[in-house]
Image (cartoon, grey):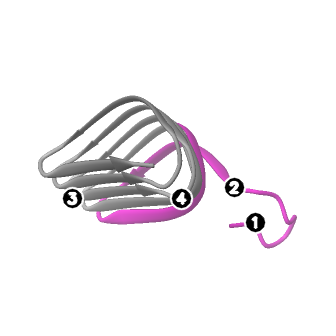
Amino acid sequence: IFQAATGKRIIANVSLHVLGNVGNAVEGVEWSGIFNVQADYLQGVQGAGIINIIGNDAAWIQGAGIANIVSGRFDGAQGAGVFNIAS
């Protein structure tokens, strides 16, 4: 995901949402009531009421009510009510 005016990648440092969020990357903290989806990576702390999905690598802490899904490598701690997946 790119910022339309400049063509730069958008990397969030603090991302807080009532329902959910779809973004590129997080280097910091992300929290949503239902879901978080990052197309690239997470380096920080991520929490959601239902599910977190990362399209590439992730590190540090991930927590969700149902599932955490990381398409790449995960370094850190994951906690979910049903399952955690990291390839």
User: Please, is residue 68 above or below residue 28 in the view?
Assistant: below
Q: Earlier in the sequence, mark 2 or mark 1?
A: 1
Nearest the eye: 14 or 38? 38
Element carrying mark 2: loop
User: Please, is residue 28 above or below residue 2 in the view?
Assistant: above
Element carrying mark 3: loop
Q: Residue at x 32, y 61 (%)?
A: 35
Query: Residue flagged by tag 3: what amino acid is it?
Result: Ile
- What residue sits right under mark 1 in the picture? 3
User: Please, is residue 8 above or below residue 11 in the view?
Assistant: below
Query: Residue flagged by tag 2: what amino acid is it?
Result: Ile
Q: Earlier in the sequence, mark 2 or mark 4?
A: 2
Structural crowding at the residue carrying mark 1, measured as other residues with C-alpha within 10 Å and reported as few (<14), some (14–19) or many (≥20): few
Q: Residue at x 68, y 67 (%)?
A: 1
Q: Along the horizontal axis of the image, is 27 left or right of 69?
A: right
- What residue sits right under mark 2 in the picture? 10
- What residue sits right under mark 4 in the picture? 55
C-alpha span from label 2 to label 4 = 15 Å
- What residue sits right under mark 3 in the picture? 50
Q: Earlier in the sequence, mark 2 or mark 3?
A: 2
C-alpha span from label 2 to label 3 = 24 Å
Q: Earlier in the sequence, mark 1 or mark 4?
A: 1
Structural crowding at the residue carrying mark 2, measured as other residues with C-alpha within 10 Å and reported as few (<14), some (14–19) or many (≥20): few
Q: Which is in the foreground here, disc 3 or disc 4?
A: 4
